[in-house]
Amino acid sequence: MESGRVPFTRRYHKLYLTTIGLSNLGDWIYLIALNLIVFEKTESAMAVAALYLLKPLASLSTNFWAGTLIDRWNHKYMIIFLDLIRGASILILAFLTELPAIYVIVFFVNMASAVFEPSSLTYATLLIPKDDRQKFQAWKSFVMSGGFLIGPGAAGLILLFWPPEAAFYVNAGTFLLSGLLMLLLPDVSVKENDSAEHRLTFRMFHEDWREVIRFSRHVPGVFFIYGWFQFMMVMAAAVDSLEAVFAKDVLHISDAAYGMLVSVAGVGIAVGSLCNAGYTHKWKASSLLSTGPLFVSAGYLLYACSTTVVGAASGFFILSFSLAFANTGFYTFYQNHVPVRMMGRIASVYSMMEAVLIIMMTVFISIAAEWGSVRLAVLTGTIIMFSGAVVLRRICIRGAGSDLLNEEIKEEEGSCTL
């Protein structure tokens, strides 16, 4: 293989961060509006939770083959295509009224997102030099916090003055602009020397899965750290599926107040990202990875135990502030310990396992909320999350002692070595 890497410039850095920010901004606007539309139509926690089940179901339907495509196709143009597909799909949502049709379109949007995320991470790894990756991830957290901060606030304003469907027009526009800006970025895809490798077959998919399994056996420490971090994200996704229901039925707040409550989390991740970006050169990725998730789960616990908007907002601020550090540590670890030539396949296969767990835990928590107490269901999920964070920290501490977190994957003649 021959890398298509081009000389790194700050202009590319800023432009790529802009495209990420636009995509993320639209996601938050449309997601909040969609949650409220479905809840108002059904007044059912299960119906809202079903929206969150669509994402892992979409991952299951794409990830067994997506990694093979990602590692062999042009990353830049794949990202552009996926941006345009998501924008067009969300635009269609504005004209739908029937719940089944809404679920179908959201499912297709999530399918495109399932392919987009590993494609984007692989592209960033090729574009950004190794020594700049931790700083880039820190600034990426800050840019994404802009969507987290501005998105819910913008959604709240839209809900005050326009119907919720207006959020879909805004979201479609951000995806379109993101795709157009990607045209200005360089092509850094890995180029295959043998064009025959582009002919995809079932045998190729099978061999790719075997290669991922071999990699996981060769570096089990990487597999376990990745797994425990994603387990925390699984529990966060399950708890988040009841966020709107918790706000409406437990805290008894208005739609606009809910939007502003989520904006507090945006402030937290913005402040956390700024601190992270400013001092990232003083912290090791291993420290961020071991400590960040612990505080994220503590914030979720505070949120689950709150009885007032102030208490919930405090929990949101703590968890989002800490999430900036946790994500920077995790993604830097991933980029430095996974060979770029198979990042798409590894991310896709691991995401399949994550999707199964998300479905199981979301169903469990939503059933507990539907048949029992919303607060108890959310509290149970956050306690499990905190326990996972404690285990992850212990693994990271042991890994640091054995130099696992300080060593990197190197690609030599197509093989992976630690």
Image (spheres, rainbow, N blue to C red):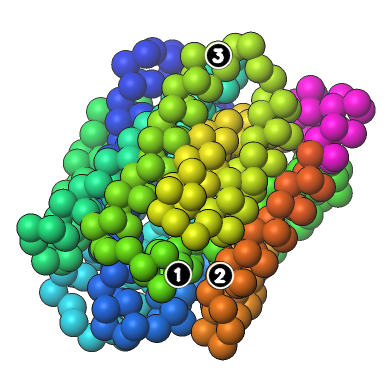
Q: Relative to the observer, which residue lies in front, 310 or 319?
A: 310
Tag 1–tag 2 contact (CB < 8 Å): yes
Please tell me which residue is depicted at 26% across the width and 83% down the height of the picture.
41
Please tell me which residue is depicted at 61% across the width and 72% down the height of the picture.
376
**Type of amino acid at the residue the image marks with label 2:** Arg
Of helix, strand and loop, which one carries label 3?
helix
Residue 304 belongs to the span the image colors magenta: no
Of helix, strand and loop, which one carries label 1?
helix
- How much space separates mark 1 and mark 3, taking CA atoms? 38 Å
| Residue denoted by label 3 | 279
| Residue denoted by label 2 | 375
Identify the mark at residue 250; answer none if there is no mark.
1
User: In this image, 286 relative to 233: left or right?
Assistant: right
What span is colored magenta in the figure?
394-418
Q: Report x, y in % for residue 265.
A: 42, 43
The relative height of residue 153 versus residue 142 in the rendered view (above or below) is below
Q: Report x, y in % for residue 114.
A: 47, 58
**Type of amino acid at the residue the image marks with label 3:** Tyr
Residue 302 visible, this angle: yes
